[in-house]
Image (cartoon, helix red, strand yellow):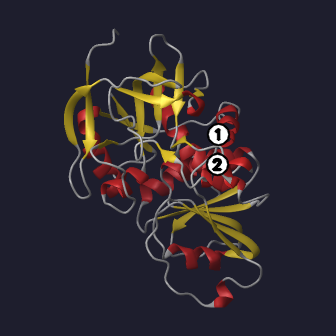
Amino acid sequence: MAVTDEMRAMVFEGPGRPLRAVTRAIPEPRPGQLLLRVRACGVCRTDLHLLDGEVPVADPPRILGHQIVATVEPGEERVGVPWLGWSCGECEPCRSGRENLCPRARFTGCDIDGGMAEYTVADERYCFPIPEGYPDEQAAPLLCAGLIGYRALRMCGDARRIGLYGFGAAAHIIAQVATWQGRRVFAFTRPGDTAAQAFALELGASWVGSSEKQPPEPLDAAIIFAPDGALVPLALSAVAPGGTVVCGGIHMSDIPSFPYRALWGERILRSVANLTRADAEEFLALAPEVPVSTHVRSYSLEDAGKALEDLRAGRFTGAAVITP
């Protein structure tokens, strides 16, 4: 496909406003950047937080999308672009291997135009080879749902019994990794979401139930992917003494007060913030070994807004992917 002067894109113009289809000039890569032809872009719950104004977007109008599978122009080399799009390399977090906490970090589809378009540009240092054997659509969810989920799973240490609260894009990937590692997965869903519960069982979960229920045995760790602060006390009450609860999202509703005894017993409550390039390299090498199989629903570029609303309403299992 020859590079032309213009491209189609879906742009965010402000909180509460629908994405708008536009035609704009194909971006010019600066030194150190790659011009990318987008082949697939995963839809993430973070995109909903941006759309709703719960996470601020820098300098709208902005092209959302941070799970990008693309080819480098000119050519056919496939790369993936994740949420972390740039870090300074100079601050203490960067110099200590924690570039995910860089105070000057810039994020794809938030501070930098993302992948809900036919073309984008990205810093070549934050582009990663896509594992062979993954079609474009199946690879896209690995780049955030997979990476953030994997970072959250690593924070669970050697926990053998792991609860996953919210069985969406990230959980359906991490359930496969955890099961492959010999762990037992306990999947918690919205009350009455029998489709998600059946999906979790298909992917190897040992037990499924609604989020307000207690599991049949204490958990060693739990990961909360759903952006509902009320799940925090529930997860703390489900983990055994010494257990860990990891909050895996960039935004969560307020956590209600809970008695100290829910935290007592050396339980740990922590969050995951963004990702590092090391996370990307490690997980993208691991995914084919499992092998992780992503379940996706595809949408056209112009239907990006519909994909976001279907995600909000829980109208599909697995992940949504835009295919320009």
- Number of marks present in the image shown: 2
Q: Secondary structure at mark 2?
A: helix
Spot occupied by residue 162 in the image (x, y as percentages of width and height): 68, 61
Is tag 2's residue or tag 1's residue first in the polypeptide sequence? 2
Look at 56% across and 30% down and name the residue there: 127
Q: Is residue 84 left or right of residue 91?
A: left
Look at 40% across and 66% down and name the residue there: 192
Q: Is residue 280 left or right of residue 109?
A: right
Kind of residue at disc 2: Glu
Spot occupied by residue 301 in the image (x, y as percentages of width and height): 28, 33
Q: Nearer the viewer, mark 2 or mark 1?
A: 2
Look at 43% across and 22% down and name the residue there: 35
Occupied quadrant, residue 297? top left
Occupied quadrant, residue 207? bottom right
Front residue of 58 and 129: 58
How far apart marks 2 and 1 lie (CA) works out to: 8 Å
Front residue of 70 and 235: 70
Q: Secondary structure at mark 1?
A: helix
Q: Which residue is mark 2?
A: 99
* Residue 124 in the image: above or below residue 220: above
Spot occupied by residue 291 in the image (x, y as percentages of width and height): 65, 33
Occupied quadrant, residue 65? top left
Pointers 2 and 1 in contact (C-beta within 8 Å): yes
Kind of residue at disc 1: Arg
* Residue 255 in the image: above or below residue 77: below
Q: Which residue is mark 1?
A: 277
* Residue 315 in the image: above or below residue 234: above
Look at 54% across and 51% down and name the residue there: 104
